[in-house]
Image: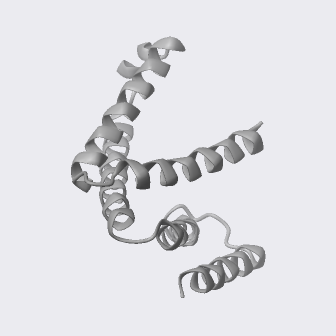
């Protein structure tokens, strides 16, 4: 099931880029990001109430609150940069660079979460870097 959800995530992310490029035309990128974020906020809270998960709020630890807030700030910064980049650049070049987050995530997971970085991970990272360079040059 995780594979199907991950594949759907990739499809929706691709649609996000195309729809955003069309929608951002003539709109301030920060305003466009705020509108997108508002829609995501409504959709997320809708799912919380639809699945009756709102009762779990009181059991969230301070550590989890801190890291969820930091994650939200990182997401916001990413989206603001991404929207400005697709507004002034070509989506076909911005998206591959944005997807370098996979390589950066692997490195950060190794450094901070002590996750295994295998030969397969290294080869995949090198291929992703090479593919990104080919696509943007």
Residue 134 to residue 33: above or below: below
Residue 25 visible in the snapshot: yes
Q: Residue at x 55, y 50 (%)?
A: 13
Q: Residue at x 70, y 81 (%)?
A: 127
Q: Residue at x 45, y 13 (%)?
A: 49
Q: Residue furthest bottom?
A: 137
Residue 118, x across and y down, in percent: 73, 74
Relative horizontal placement of residue 17, taking residue 117 as reference (left or right): left
Q: Nearer the viewer, residue 86 or 45?
A: 86
Residue 56 visible in the snapshot: no
Position of the N terminus, as image quadrant, is top right
Coloration mode: one colour
Please tell me in which quadrant of the rendered image residue 56 appears: top left
Residue 60 to residue 131: above or below: above
Residue 133 to residue 32: above or below: below
Residue 64, x across and y down, in percent: 39, 39
Q: Nearer the viewer, residue 46 or 48?
A: 46
User: Number of callouts in the render?
Assistant: 0
Q: Nearer the viewer, residue 121 or 21?
A: 21
Residue 72, x across and y down, in percent: 34, 46
Please tell me in which quadrant of the rendered image residue 38 appears: top left
Position of the C terminus, as image quadrant, is bottom right
Residue 17, x across and y down, in percent: 49, 54
Relative horizontal placement of residue 14, taking residue 73 as reference (left or right): right
């Amino acid at each position: 099931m995780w594979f199907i959800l991950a594949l759907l995530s990739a499809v929706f992310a691709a649609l996000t880029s195309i729809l955003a490029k069309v929608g951002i035309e003539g709109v301030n990128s920060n305003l466009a990001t705020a509108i997108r974020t508002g829609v995501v906020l409504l959709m997320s809270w809708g799912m919380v109430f639809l699945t009756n998960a709102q009762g779990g709020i009181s059991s969230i630890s301070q550590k989890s609150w801190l890291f969820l807030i930091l994650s939200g700030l990182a997401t916001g910064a990413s989206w603001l940069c991404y929207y400005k980049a697709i507004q002034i650049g070509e989506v076909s070049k911005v998206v591959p660079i944005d997807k370098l987050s996979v390589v950066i995530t692997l490195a950060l997971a190794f450094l901070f979460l002590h996750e295994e970085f295998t030969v397969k991970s290294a080869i995949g990272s090198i291929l992703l870097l090479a593919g990104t360079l080919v696509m943007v040059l």
